Amino acid sequence: MNDYTKAVKALLLAAGCVLKRQGKGDHEIWFSPLTERAFTVDGAIKSRHTANGTLKDAGLPKAF
């Protein structure tokens, strides 16, 4: 299985999203200027579906 975590975080940073704080466990809370909302990012994204869901929460198009 692939690990999409680094690629997703790179796309989020390129889009202007910022890390707000640590969440519970290995999750992080990020803020998207596109949607003006906070969303969670898993610390170990193993599925392309989860990766694309995270990008959708940030207001970005699918990439995987």
Image (cartoon, helix red, strand yellow):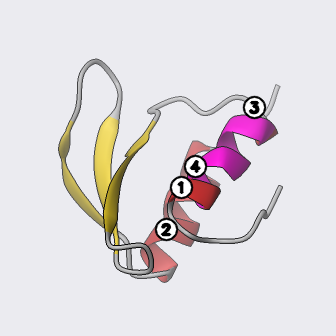
In the rendered image, which quarter contains the N terminus?
top right
Tag 4, which secondary structure?
helix
Residue 8 is marked as: none
- Mark 3 to mark 2: distance in Å? 17 Å
How far apart are labels 1 and 3 at the CA level?
A: 16 Å
Percent of width and height locating residue 57: 53, 55
- Any mark on residue 12, and which? 2
Q: In this picture, is 8 found above or below 18?
A: above
Q: Residue at x 62, y 71 (%)?
A: 60
Per the model, the C-alpha gap separating discs 4 and 2 is 9 Å
Indicate left or right for 30 with 52 as reference.
left
**Which residue type carries mark 4?**
Thr
Q: Secondary structure at mark 1?
A: helix
- Give the mark, 3 or 4, whose residue is nearer the N terminus: 3
Q: According to the image, label 1 marks what residue?
A: 57
Q: Which segment did they paint magenta?
A: 49-55
Q: CA distance from mark 2 to mark 1?
A: 11 Å
Q: Is residue 24 above or below residue 45?
A: above
* Side of 17 where 58 appears, left or right: right
Q: Name the residue: 47% across, 33% down.
A: 42
Expressed as whole percent of the image width and height from the top left, the position of residue 26 reads 34, 25
Q: What's the amino acid at mark 1?
A: Asp
Earlier sequence position, callout 3 versus callout 2:
2
Q: Which residue type carries mark 3?
A: Ser
Which quadrant does the C terminus fall into? bottom right
Q: Is residue 3 in sight in this rendering?
A: no
If you read the primary sequence from the N terminus, does the residue marked by circle 2 or circle 1 appear first? 2
Q: What residue is pinned by disc 4?
A: 54
| Residue that carries the numbered disc 3 in the rendered image | 47
Q: Can the viewer see residue 11 in this picture?
A: yes
